[in-house]
Amino acid sequence: MSRPGLFITFEGIDGAGKSSHIEGLAAAFRTQGRTVTVSREPGGTPLAEKLREMVLNDPMDALTESLLIFAARRDHLRNVIEPALARGDVVLCDRFTDATFAYQGAGRGFDLGVLSTLERLAQTGLAPEASLMREPDLTVWFDLAPEVAAERLAGARVPDRFEAQPVEFFRRVAQGYADRAAAAPQRFARLDAAQERHRVWQQLTSVFVRKGWLAIMVATQGGPQ
Ligand SMILES: Nc1ncnc2c1ncn2[C@@H]1O[C@H](COP(=O)(O)OP(=O)(O)O)[C@@H](O)[C@H]1O
Ligand SMILES: Cc1cn([C@H]2C[C@H](O)[C@@H](COP(=O)(O)OP(=O)(O)O)O2)c(=O)[nH]c1=O
């Protein structure tokens, strides 16, 4: 019998360490014979990647930004995420809707009620059930103090429109994530992202072992170099 798909998202402020672990986790799932789709938001389809370029580089007001992000998300859901879940893939997505609540909502101060309306519009009416609002099965939250994230990013890459924001912006974003996690504790797994890379990997894989999604042998073999 085919296994059901799994939709897993990765969240946290810029520089929290998400990207450093997603490929390792994909490899661990593949070792177990699962097919893995790795993607990211905003982006993941040709249209959504075009929208990403605009959102990350062109100044715009918070409503325009939110509309573009949710438009990208719907295209991504329809063309990549839903088909992958229907095939039984493990979908690992670098950011999803919690990022919109954290960045546009908490960070930019945009209306959370409007974001909830857009969330329902963009994430409903898709396979397998038209009435179901697609949400992640699990969200891994890399929790890190903004000052530490800023130190890690300094010199590491050219900042985009969000990464160039002051530390106060990221304090609000971090609080936005904390609020989302408190509102849906069964969906969120919080990692202490301040620890060394291999310790973060241990925390990450033990979440998946506890859920019965990864075998302990596979979890202890992989990880960052
Ligand atoms: N646990 C860690 N300790 C120290 N530095 C880290 C750790 N995890 C990642 N880094 C470094 O911090 C920077 C940001 O990591 P990255 O994975 O790109 O974060 P994100 O994808 O969340 O923005 C990179 O230079 C990365 O090498
Ligand atoms: C998904 C999403 C991302 N963002 C922002 C957060 C990040 O600063 C930026 C791109 O995210 P990300 O892909 O994590 O950037 P990088 O690959 O450089 O680590 O987009 C939002 O503001 N709202 C959203 O809904």
Image: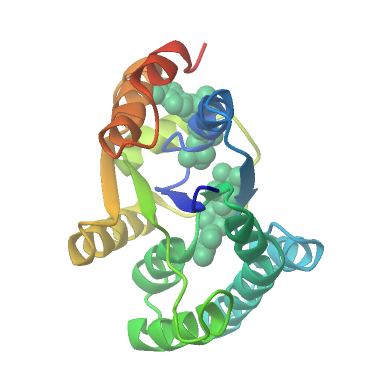
Vertical placement of residue 124 versus 27, above or below:
below
Vertical placement of residue 83 versus 205, above or below:
below
Regarding residue 42, the answer to whether it shows in the image is no
Callout count: 0
- Which color mode does the image show? rainbow
Q: Nearer the viewer, residue 186 or 58?
A: 186
Vertical placement of residue 58 versus 35, above or below:
below
At which x and y percent is residue 79? 72, 67
At which x and y percent is residue 108? 42, 71
Q: Which residue is depicted at the point 60% across and 61% down?
A: 86
- Where in the image, quadrant-wise, is ligand 2 located? bottom right
At which x and y percent is residue 24? 53, 26
Q: Which residue is depicted at the point 30% across and 63% down?
A: 176
Q: Nearer the viewer, residue 23 or 197?
A: 23
Q: State which quadrant residue 140 falls in.
A: top left
Regarding residue 148, the answer to whether it shows in the image is yes
At which x and y percent is residue 139? 37, 51
Q: Which residue is depicted at the point 38% across and 37% down?
A: 213
Determine the residue located farthest toward the front in the rendered image.
1
Left or right placement of residue 202 versus residue 66 in this view: left
Vertical placement of residue 97 versus 41, above or below:
below
Left or right placement of residue 97 versus residue 46 in this view: left
Q: Which residue is depicted at the point 50% across and 54% down?
A: 95
Left or right placement of residue 221 versus residue 147 in this view: right
Q: State which quadrant residue 43 falls in.
A: bottom right
